[in-house]
Amino acid sequence: MSVPALKSAAQGASAVSARRRRLTLSMERREWLAGYLFVAPDALGLLTFVAAPAFLALALGTFQVDGFGGYQFVGLGNYRRMLADPLFLQSLRVTAIYVVALVPCLYVVGLALALAVQRPSLASSVFRSLFFMPQMVSLVVVALVWQVLLVDKIGLLTRAAAFLGLGHISWFGDPTFSLAVIVFISVWFLMGFYMLIFLGGLQDIPREFYDAAKIDGAGPIACFFHITLPLLQPTSFFILLVSTVTAVCGSQTFDLIYVTTKGGPANSTSLTTFYIYQTAFEFGDYGYAAAMASVLIVILMALTFVLFLITRGGRFHYA
């Protein structure tokens, strides 16, 4: 073959190679575009309904609003006001207690229920449905039912406590019991949802690990701590993150508190979100409410960041 022919063949090969590279790059760009298109609806929703209201609340928090359309710029005055507001500080304390009590309870109860009903059987299917059934009912209805059960003197559970010699306990009217009752009802209402999430994580664990452990003589407790918990790391991280956000925001508790206690007695069940609602829609102080909401968002972001650091984004370390 002559030299010009060889050069022509080489140029043709290089042209084909260049076209292949362009085709590969085009495929990569298409995959990149497809990925962003799939994410776009959620991203647009977050920007519209979460990020934009958060920035608006941050801006509104620098104004004093009288509720009749009057705005007066006060700068950081609303934030300085929080430091001297005993009701706001009380709501933060109640929220902290609620988070510390609710998140571990949801984790333990959800995992325990998932372990109890993970084996496929008719009984397990029935119990799964029963545990998840509260999620199918409005939280307002749930609150009304529990209010009937725990109402003073005539409630079914109140009469049962009196019959057992515990006296006439005012479950919603005594600050000693009110927040604990709210936590209990919240766990009862949410446990089915977290049970299903744990069930999904448990079903992803290969059975070969448990079979090999049984051959080595490991018992159920050893299998739980050395196989189940380590392999549930991503699920555990998701549970802790979602339950923490739920508890801090009070998104699943506002209706319950509004129907049963209205934040009382003596503000013992007044979460920060409920106090923000009262400040905005009952007292008409929208600027101060927006400032408190901004602080709550910062607290939630800080808790999420700490949770990411502790768990390394779902990668726990077990000794």
Image: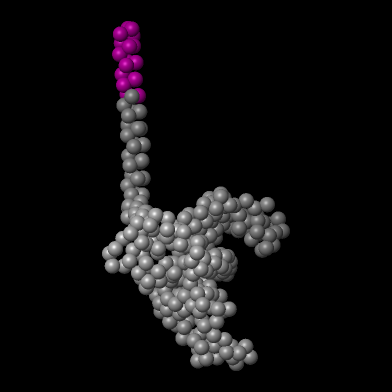
Q: For the N terminus, which image quadrant?
A: top left
The residue under the point 42% across, 78% down is 259
- Looking at the picture, does residue 220 appear above or below residue 14? below
Tell me if residue 2 is in the magenta stretch. Answer: yes
Residue lying farthest to the right in this orientation: 217
Residue lying farthest to the top in this orientation: 2
> Is 71 left or right of 176, judged from the image as shown?
left
Q: Is 115 in front, or is 280? A: 280
> Is 78 left or right of 265, judged from the image as shown?
left
Q: Is 191 in front, or is 148? A: 148
List x then y, in percent, for residue 121: 52, 71
The residue under the point 32% across, 52% down is 44
Colouring chosen for the image of the structure: one colour
Q: How many marks?
A: 0
Residue 23: quarter of image: top left
List x then y, in percent, for residue 93: 54, 67
Q: Is residue 137 visible?
A: no
List x then y, in percent, for residue 257: 45, 75
The residue under the point 56% across, 57% down is 232
- Looking at the picture, does residue 170 appear above or below residue 284? below
The residue under the point 50% across, 75% down is 267
Tell me if residue 312 is in the magenta stretch. Answer: no
Q: Is 115 in front, or is 86? A: 86
Q: Which residues are magenta?
A: 1-17
Residue lying farthest to the left in this orientation: 69
Q: Main secondary structure of the magenta part?
A: helix
Q: Is 251 in front, or is 115? A: 251
List x then y, in percent, for residue 49: 34, 58
